[in-house]
Image (cartoon, rainbow, N blue to C red):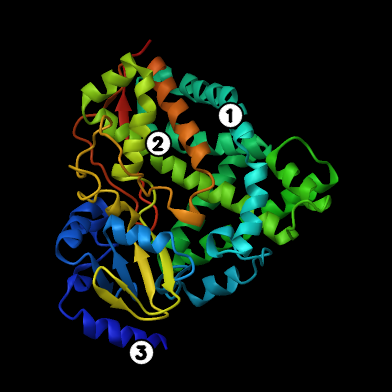
């Protein structure tokens, strides 16, 4: 079946944009929006031989796919898995978590699992974290404020989210550096370009983080606290949450890995686009109430998640193209977020723009990101505290801005900044 689908798709799109789509090419990694803008104009739905998938670039088509889990099942990047070495796949098979992840299943199983984590990750709990998040922001700024210069990614964007998630889960601070390393390895292995000789180490990190969250759940079962992990375990023990131990572990892993990686990258994107025009930074220094709009515009314009994968459950049509049953569909949320038909002057970063439609940075439909309120809160508070503490913050001149190659996550290698010492 897969070979038939590929043959039909390839014949249908011979000579199209698919041959030019190179998501790990240097030009694409540096700026994927040049190609996606071209695709929206020339061939908004095209077949990619590299991904063995149909690529969707316009907002209307993207929403049509993301909102319809009955016709488009959530799936993984199948073509990427084939690039893992046999040794890496063998190690991954040893993972102690056997449950399918929340981000890989559709209703009704998805509804059952999401309901449990939604209750534990309530709006009240998120709002209650604000004083703690503010204190963590100041604590990090205290460490580097006297320096007058540094890499924002390394000094703030990377440690900050793991400190917040650590507070939410009551993780020992001594574990933070290890969790950061595991998270980086897992994201690189699953969605990046890892040399064959390094894949086994990344696979071991995946197994290690799974064991870590399972051990965490076991400890909370024996000695529950007031953290989110304890609440999940208590709900399971009381029969209120129909989850297995493996499912609890899979949800804790999502919080640690997905919640961490996306926020790191969002923080870097926000600050880059603010500081690239000094008047933007001055505007939030003078009026911090502008920060939420900045965060939303950064999510739309250059968010941390490039796309999401689906599989067509039946033969469908998208953007005038016939999609065979069983074909993979790669939805470029990042391209849809710049669609001029929905976002006028969409290729321009403009925090003051009117927002007639919602961006797709957190997805759409039943798989809308469950951690979106926390990510927004973390980023807002971080920018508010940076503006208050470092009003003279600016980019170091003539630095190279580069991004880590990754199919799904878009994030800076580093962001060199400087400020007037106190």
Determine crowd level at label 2: few under 14, some 14-19, many 20+ residues with C-alpha closer than 10 A. many
Residue at image position (19%, 62%) is: 39
Q: Are marks 2 and 1 in contact (CB under 8 Å)?
A: no
Which residue, given by chain and number where applicable, does mark 1 sit on?
A: 127
Q: Is residue 10 above or below residue 156?
A: below
Q: Is residue 37 left or right of residue 119?
A: left
Q: Is residue 260 visible?
A: yes
Q: Viewer-proximal residue, 133 or 349?
A: 349
Dot 2: element: helix
Q: Is residue 236 left or right of residue 396?
A: right
Disc count in the image?
A: 3
Reading the chain from its start, which is encountered first: label 3 or label 2? 3
| Residue in the picture at 71% in, 37% down | 227
Quadrant of the frame with the C terminus: top left
- Count neighbours of disc 3 (C-alpha within 10 A) and say few if under 14, some if 14 to 19, many if 20 or more: few
Q: Name the mark on residue 4.
A: 3
Task: Note whether residue 171 is visible.
Answer: no
Which label belongs to residue 260? none
Residue drawn at x 41%, y 65% as measured from the top left = 309
The vertical placement of 44 against 380, above or below, is: below
Q: Which quadrant of the view contains residue 298?
A: top left
Q: Nearer the viewer, mark 2 or mark 1?
A: 1
First reached walking from the N terminus: tag 1 or tag 3: 3
Residue 22 place in picture, x, y as percent: 25, 66
Q: Position of residue 1 (x, y in %)?
A: 42, 89
Q: Which residue is mark 2?
A: 267
Mark 2–mark 1 Cα distance, whole angstroms, equals 19 Å
């Amino acid at each position: 079946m897969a070979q038939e689908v590929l043959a039909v798709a390839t014949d249908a799109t011979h000579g199209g944009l698919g041959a030019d789509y190179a998501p790990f090419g240097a030009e694409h990694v540096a700026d994927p929006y040049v190609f996606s803008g071209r695709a929206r104009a020339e061939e908004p739905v095209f077949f990619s031989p590299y991904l063995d998938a149909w690529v969707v670039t316009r907002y209307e088509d993207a929403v049509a796919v993301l909102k319809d889990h009955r016709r488009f099942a959530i799936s993984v990047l199948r073509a990427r898995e084939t690039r893992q070495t046999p040794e890496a796949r063998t190690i991954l098979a040893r993972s102690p978590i056997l449950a399918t992840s929340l981000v890989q299943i559709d209703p009704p199983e998805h509804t059952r699992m999401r309901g449990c984590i939604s209750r534990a990750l309530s709006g009240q709990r998120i709002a209650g974290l604000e004083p703690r998040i503010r204190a963590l922001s100041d604590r990090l700024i205290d460490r580097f404020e006297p320096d007058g210069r540094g890499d924002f990614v390394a000094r703030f964007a990377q440690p900050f989210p793991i400190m917040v998630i650590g507070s939410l889960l009551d993780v020992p601070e001594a574990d933070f550096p290890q969790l950061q390393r595991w998270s980086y390895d897992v994201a690189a292995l699953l969605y990046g370009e890892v040399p064959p000789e390094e894949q086994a180490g990344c696979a071991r990190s995946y197994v290690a983080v799974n064991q870590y969250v399972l051990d965490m759940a076991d400890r909370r079962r024996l000695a529950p606290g007031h953290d989110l992990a304890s609440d999940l375990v208590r709900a399971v023990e009381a029969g209120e949450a129909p989850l297995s131990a493996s499912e609890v572990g899979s949800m804790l892993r999502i919080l640690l890995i997905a919640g961490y990686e996306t926020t790191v990258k969002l923080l870097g994107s926000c600050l880059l686009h603010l500081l690239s025009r000094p008047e933007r930074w001055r505007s939030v220094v003078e009026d911090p109430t502008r920060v939420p709009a900045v965060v939303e515009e950064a999510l739309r314009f250059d968010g941390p998640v490039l796309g999401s994968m689906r599989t067509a459950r039946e033969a469908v049509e998208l953007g005038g193209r016939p999609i065979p049953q069983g074909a993979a569909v790669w939805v470029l949320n990042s391209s849809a977020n710049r669609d001029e038909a929905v976002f006028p002057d969409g290729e321009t970063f403009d925090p003051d723009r009117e927002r007639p439609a919602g961006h797709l940075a957190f997805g759409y439909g039943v798989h809308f990101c469950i951690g979106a309120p926390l990510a927004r809160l973390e980023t807002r508070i971080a920018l508010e505290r940076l503006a208050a503490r470092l009003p003279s913050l600016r980019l170091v001149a003539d630095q190279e801005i580069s991004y880590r190659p990754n199919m799904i996550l878009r994030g800076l290698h580093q962001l060199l900044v400087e400020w007037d010492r106190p």
